[in-house]
Image (cartoon, rainbow, N blue to C red):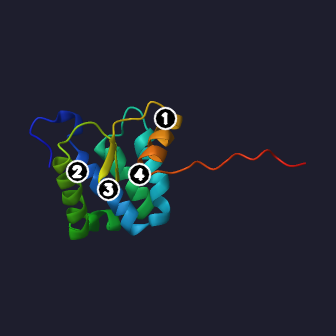
């Protein structure tokens, strides 16, 4: 689903398939897997991703994911959405007809943009009571 020659994402669909296999087979294990996948530097190889997924959900569930049409549809939908948004920087946060794209400068700035885009008012901080 990537443009030819996009070597920085050679295994992107295979990694996504492993992540979705964990999500579908063991949703309670997905947050741990997702955090590991995003925080590991340098990014894990496909082999490392498959080993970690297999540890969490087992070889059988991981193998079944290779032919899971639900996962095929999810990957196709994600790539179609990305293509429809004219590609550009990641990540993208979709909120109805609005979109935030690219890494935020800081958590504070990200929340400011969310609050403005969604017309939210942050909760008032109340001092601790004795």
First in sequence: mark 2 vs mark 3: 2
Image side of residue 66 versus residue 26, left or right:
left
Which residue was labeled with disc 4?
A: 52
Where is 60 relative to 79, above or below? below
Mark 2 or mark 1: which is in front? Answer: 1
Q: Residue at x 16, y 36 (%)?
A: 6
Q: Residue at x 18, y 58 (%)?
A: 76
Image coordinates for residue 89, horizontal then vertical, percent: 27, 36
Task: Give the secondary structure at mark 1.
Answer: helix
Relative to the observer, which residue lies in front, 53 or 6?
6
Image side of residue 69 versus residue 109, left or right:
left
Disc assigned to residue 18: 3
Image coordinates for residue 109, horizontal then vertical, percent: 48, 35
First in sequence: mark 1 vs mark 3: 3
Q: Residues within 10 Å of mark 3 (few under 14, many from 20)?
A: many
Which residue was labeled with disc 1?
A: 109
Relative to the observer, which residue lies in front, 57 or 25?
25
Disc 1 to disc 4: CB gap under 8 Å: no
3D distance between C-alphas at marks 3 and 4: 9 Å
3D distance between C-alphas at marks 2 and 1: 31 Å
Disc 1 to disc 3: CB gap under 8 Å: no
Residue 130 visible in the picture: yes
Where is 5 relative to 50, above or below? above
Residue 66 visible in the picture: no
Q: Residue at x 24, y 55 (%)?
A: 78
Image coordinates for residue 110, horizontal then vertical, percent: 46, 39
Disc assigned to residue 13: 2
Mark 3 or mark 4: which is in front? Answer: 3
3D distance between C-alphas at marks 1 and 3: 32 Å
Mark 1 or mark 4: which is in front? Answer: 1
Disc assigned to residue 4: none
């Amino acid at each position: 689903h990537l443009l030819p020659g996009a070597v920085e994402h050679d295994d992107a669909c295979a990694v996504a398939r492993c992540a979705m296999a964990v999500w579908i087979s063991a949703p309670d294990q997905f947050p741990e897997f997702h955090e590991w996948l995003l925080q590991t530097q340098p990014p894990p190889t496909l082999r490392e991703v498959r080993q970690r997924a297999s540890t969490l959900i087992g070889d059988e569930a991981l193998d079944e994911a290779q032919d899971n049409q639900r996962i095929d549809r999810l990957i196709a939908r994600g790539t179609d959405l990305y293509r429809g948004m004219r590609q550009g920087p990641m990540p993208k946060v979709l909120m109805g007809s609005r979109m935030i794209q690219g890494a935020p400068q800081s958590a504070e700035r990200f929340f400011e943009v969310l609050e403005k885009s969604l017309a939210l008012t942050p909760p008032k901080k109340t001092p601790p009571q004795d």
